[in-house]
Image: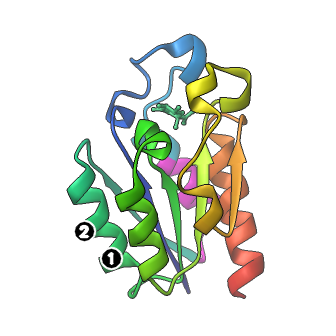
Amino acid sequence: MASIQIINGPNLNMLGVREPGIYGNCSFESYLESLRQRFPDVSFDYFQSNTEGCLIDKIQEAGFSHDGIILNAGAYTHTSIALQDAIRSIKAPVIEVHLSNVFQREEFRHHSFLSPVCMGVICGFGMDSYRLATEALLEKIS
Ligand code: DQA
């Protein structure tokens, strides 16, 4: 059974409430339920934190215990060299995801410190970005 760690960063605990015009009306917990049903042979673990250090701790841990990581680092994507270093340090491949198409938004969202060290990037498909990332990871690790 493939094991995938999903990690969501700051403000993504507010999905369903936060700017629904951009991020939709669904909480991540209820979306995760449908993801688990769609991929019964995948073991998904989910972690969310608003704190950069906690995200680093989780990347370091999951990077040696899971087959792959799906990471939506929220705004830390655009600011965090420390998250880049954490991704560089681990064994598991990481896919960077975003719900919104960051390239259609403010210019400060166009740069990612994480993309150069991730296996790939999926953005702009809402929650479906996580399903697409799962498919991509399964191709890579199977
Ligand atoms: C986001 C895009 C980021 O720019 C933003 O700061 C977020 C969410 C997304 O999923 O679209 O918090 O990562």
Task: Report the Cα–Cα distance between label 1 and label 2.
Answer: 5 Å
Q: As shown in the figure, which amino acid type bears the numbered disc 2?
A: Asp
Query: In the image, is 125 to the left or to the right of 15?
Result: right
Residue 101 visible, this orientation = no
Circle 2 residues within 10 Å: few <14, some 14–19, many ≥20: few
Residue at position x 41%, y 56% in the image? 81
Q: Name the residue located 68 percent from the left edge and 85 percent from the top edge.
A: 141
Looking at the rendered structure, the secondary structure element under dot 2 is helix
Residue at the spot 53% in from the left edge and 52% down from the top edge? 113
Callout 1 touching callout 2 (CB < 8 Å): yes
The quadrant where residue 54 appears: bottom left
Q: Secondary structure at mark 1?
A: helix
Q: Inspect this view and state whether residue 117 appears.
A: yes
Residue 60 tag number: 1
- The image quadrant that residue 93 belongs to is bottom right
Q: Is 47 displayed left or right of 51 in the figure?
A: right
Identify whether 11 is placed above or below 51.
above
Out of 60 and 18, give the one closest to the viewer. 60
Residues in magenta, as a range: 32-41
Estimate the x, y position of residue 67 in percent, counting from the top left: 53, 83
Residue beneath the point at 41% across and 18% down: 18
Would residue 54 appear left or right of 47 to someone viewing this image?
left
In the depicted structure, whether residue 92 falls above or below residue 118: below
Residue under label 2, please give it: 57
Percent coordinates x, y for residue 119 in the rendering: 67, 70
**Is residue 39 one of those drawn in magenta?**
yes
Q: Is residue 134 magenta?
A: no
Q: Is residue 109 depicted above or below 49 in this figure?
A: above
User: The N terminus lies in which quarter of the figure?
Assistant: bottom right
Q: Amino acid at mark 1?
A: Gln
Q: In the drawing, does residue 111 fall left or right of residue 46?
A: right
